[in-house]
Image (cartoon, rainbow, N blue to C red):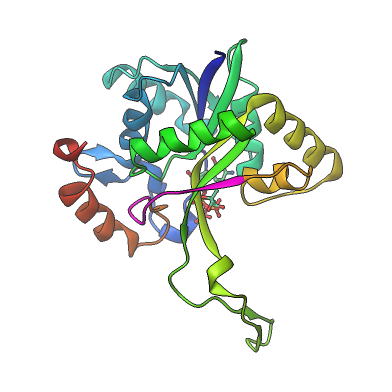
Amino acid sequence: MGKLGVVIVAAGKGSRMRTAESKQYLKLGQKPILVHTLQLFQNIHEVDEIILVVGETDMKRCSSYVKDYALTKVTSVQAGGAERQESVKKGLDALQPGTEWVLVHDGVRPFAAVEHVLSCFRKAQESDAAVLAVPVKDTIKIVNEAKQIKSTPDRRSLWAIQTPQAFRLSVLLDAHEQALNEGFLGTDDAMLVERMGTTVHVVEGDYYNIKITTPEDLPWAEWILQHVRGEGHR
Ligand SMILES: Nc1ccn([C@@H]2O[C@H](COP(=O)(O)OP(=O)(O)OP(=O)(O)O)[C@@H](O)[C@H]2O)c(=O)n1
Ligand SMILES: C[C@](O)(CO)[C@H](O)COP(=O)(O)O
């Protein structure tokens, strides 16, 4: 079976966190958030390689993390782009020859459960494309610029999409190429694959797999680390 590569994207500015330090480097417990995420995939047996994509100015610091935390599966640290989609593509292009499958994962999602990561990977092996997700709990409404509610989609069909997002590498590379050629910018990789007409499957994860984005997420992340996904809970 072809190799499994993981692209961890961590080249964002973290502007919604409103901290001087980019959020992926904020301490969670004793380690930067990004290190927790890298260690998650380092410790998954099925993962053959990790490509880390970071800001140009953070390359040196992240190379030190790779050494200090013995992240032996991180084969290269790449400089990301202005948009997440560009950062993903930089990571895809760095994967070693012989890579058949890829997981694309946000560096600020340290709490994906190993069992869910593997379920997502297995689903992609069957179907070429799968993403982790959870059913939406709130009622979601479509609202116009004037903050007037225009419609209320049936909640039973709404899922909050997470990462990892798992793909046959050739499928995702084609999707990125087409998006680039057409100037299409998506907020996740699944969008690029969907628009090619490939069915993307949802694999149910859990609500602990948060994307650390705004200040309110930090205490919640500390709680999850202490009570759910800490070292002792793996
Ligand atoms: N040009 C970018 C933008 C985002 N990301 C990464 O994509 C993940 C999800 O993005 P998000 O949570 O939006 O991070 P930021 O873009 O940094 O946050 P913000 O939108 O608040 O600036 C993060 O790990 C982020 O570092 C990236 O690698 N390259
Ligand atoms: C990829 C993602 O995490 C799926 O929910 C999300 O789209 C990333 O969005 P962001 O604005 O780049 O954080």
Counting from the top left corner in percent of width and height, residue 149 is at: 63, 87
What is the x, y in percent for residue 67? 32, 16
Front residue of 7 and 206: 206
For this orientation, the residue located farthest to the front is 126
Residue at the image position 58 percent from the left and 13 percent from the top: 96
Outermost residue to the top: 97
Q: Is residue 83 left or right of residue 29?
A: right
Task: Name the quadrant of the C terminus.
Answer: top left
Q: Quadrant of residue 166?
A: top right
Which residue is at the front of the view, 47 or 86? 47
**In this image, 61 relative to 227: left or right?**
right
Residue in view at x 76 percent, y 31 percent: 174
Q: Nearer the viewer, residue 220 or 234?
A: 234
Q: Is residue 205 magenta?
A: yes
Q: Is residue 214 left or right of residue 228?
A: right
The boundaries of the magenta stretch are: 201-209
**Res 68 → quadrant:** top left
Which residue is pictured at 50% across the width and 32% down the height? 121
User: Does the segment drawn in magenta span residue 64?
Assistant: no
Q: Is residue 76 above or below residue 28?
A: above
Name the one closer to the observer, 174 or 116: 116
